[in-house]
């Protein structure tokens, strides 16, 4: 039984957590346009308190988006910036 409990977070199975993470990612991309900034507290209030997502799923989504360079943290992870994709990062142009 401990193995079943260890595979879940906040009462969610791995599949449910992945599904919730995908929905949060989609909503963050929609809610935070390129180049815009918000605070972690605001996102937590919107997604966890108002929309009922788990805080673990929000944390995981923010971690994934940071690793993909979609968002960037500043101010000890209190401020979240939506990154703008630069042409230089797209790779070299071999014309």
Image: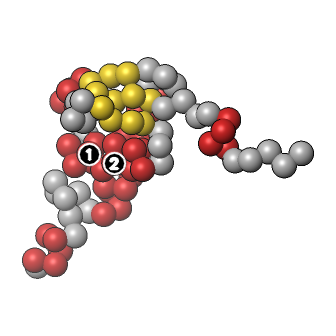
Element at badge 1? Answer: helix
Q: Is residue 50 visible?
A: no
Q: Is residue 36 visible?
A: yes
Q: CA distance from mark 1 to mark 2?
A: 6 Å
Quadrant of image for the C terminus: top right
Asked whether the residues under the numbered discs 1 and 2 touch, taking CB atoms below 8 Å apart as contact, a structural biologist would say yes
For this view, does 50 lie left or right of residue 35? left
Q: Residue at x 24, y 30 (%)?
A: 75
Q: Residue at x 28, y 27 (%)?
A: 79
> Residue 21 at what x, y percent from top left?
36, 48
For this view, does 50 lie left or right of residue 82? left
Q: Residue at x 28, y 42 (%)?
A: 58
User: Is disc 2 surrounded by few (<14), some (14 to 19) or many (20+) residues within 10 Å?
Assistant: some
Q: Is residue 75 above or below residue 8?
A: above
Q: Is residue 32 above or below residue 88?
A: above
Label of residue 68 in the image: none
Q: Is residue 57 above or below residue 74?
A: below
Q: Is residue 27 above or below residue 15?
A: above
- Residue matched to label 1: 59
> Residue 85 at what x, y percent from top left?
58, 34
Residue sitting nearer the eye, 95 or 66: 95
For this view, does 31 lie left or right of residue 54? right
Q: Quadrant of residue 76?
A: top left
- Residue matched to label 2: 63
> Residue 78 at what x, y percent from top left?
22, 30
> Residue 84 at what x, y percent from top left?
54, 30
Element at badge 2? Answer: helix
């Amino acid at each position: 039984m401990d193995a079943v409990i260890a595979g879940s977070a906040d009462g969610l199975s791995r599949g449910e957590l992945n599904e919730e993470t995908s929905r949060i990612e989609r909503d963050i991309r929609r809610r935070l346009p390129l180049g815009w900034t918000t605070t972690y507290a605001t996102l937590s209030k919107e997604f966890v308190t108002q929309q009922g997502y788990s805080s673990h799923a929000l944390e995981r989504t923010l971690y994934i988006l940071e690793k993909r360079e979609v968002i960037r943290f500043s101010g000890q992870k209190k401020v979240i910036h939506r990154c703008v994709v630069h042409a230089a990062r797209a790779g070299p142009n071999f014309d």
